[in-house]
Amino acid sequence: MDFYQNIKLKRYSELSSLLKFVAHLTTITMEQLQGRKAIITGGGRGLGRATALALAAEGVDIAITGRNEEALLETVAAIQAFGVKAIYSVFDVTDLEAVKKGIGYITEAFGAIDILVNNAGTATFGSFLEMQPERWKEILDVNVMGIYNVTYEVLPKMVARNTGDIINVASTAGLRGNANTTAYTASKFAVVGFSEALMMEVRKHNIRVSTLTPSTIATDMSLSLNLTDGNPDKVLQAEDFAELIVAQLKLNRRAMLKSASLWSTNP
């Protein structure tokens, strides 16, 4: 073996050792999610279901909420296959009294809540003059007041424990307006503003508030609204979104992902 081969082998060995050391540091500094407790609104299908399954795979006990009990039961069964605890509560996020009752039931069953994913939402698109005022208000109620109601019930105990994660699901529509999206865009802009203001308010309690603004993802809602054909080779899938949530929750608690946009590479 000549001199240059010896140098190459030595450098390779040094690089290998460095990579192993870095990997070791990563494992000891990343947050471990095993045993955490999470609430996911709109958890029966779509982004909520995918997030629930991804967190369950990390050992997180999951409580999902929604209005469709059949979908919730099916998702609970899928979560339990990971060997974690899974429960559900049926309520409308716009009904504060129902939210209080539902969150009360979850808190009694789980104790402390570590993670809240405000995912429940609704959408209708059409011109401003064509959309009826009742539907316009309903979109704002679900997408904005729904987040307020659930957060209002969960946040006090996070503050008392001086820790927690709140992830609010907005949209790229909350960053830029487009024609025929006035109600949806207004609601998502509100979510972005609410999240940032709340983040600034509660970070002193070691609570991380994050806003996610994905572009179109292949879900039941986006497919029914003809926003995408859902091509899995090109269009974002719910699992992609769930991976982002898991990754950000694993960040060392000194670090917080304030906001992030997830886009399809080449739809």
Image (spheres, helix red, strand yellow):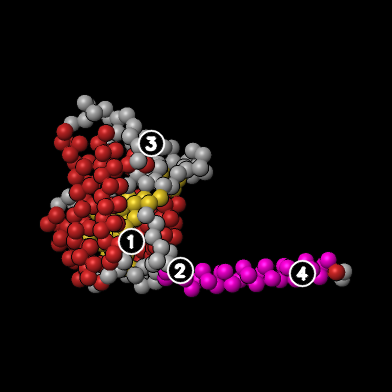
Instruction: Give the residue type that dot 4 points to.
Output: Leu
| Image-based side of 215 in relation to 39, left or right | right
Contact, mark 2 vs mark 3 (Cβ under 8 Å): no
Residue of label 1: 208
Name which quarter of the figure residue 180 lies in: top left
Precedes in sequence: disc 3 or disc 4: 4
Which of the two discs, 1 and 4, labels the residue nearer the N terminus?
4
Which of the marked residues, 2 or 1, is nearer the chain's N terminus?
2
**How far apart are labels 2 and 1 at the CA level?**
15 Å
Residue 176, given in percent of the width and then of the height, sits at 35, 37
Relative image position of residue 45 (x, y in whole percent): 33, 52
As drawn, which residue projects farthest toward the left? 97
Assign a secondary structure to mark 4: helix
Q: Which residue is mark 4?
A: 9
Q: Which label was assigned to residue 30?
A: 2
Q: Are marks 4 and 2 in contact (CB under 8 Å)?
A: no
- Please report the bounds of the magenta region as a residue range: 4-32
Taking 220 as reference, is 93 left or right? left
Q: Nearer the viewer, residue 222 or 198?
A: 198
Question: Which-is-in-front pick, marks 3 and 4?
Answer: 4
Residue picked out by circle 3: 227
- Kind of residue at disc 1: Arg
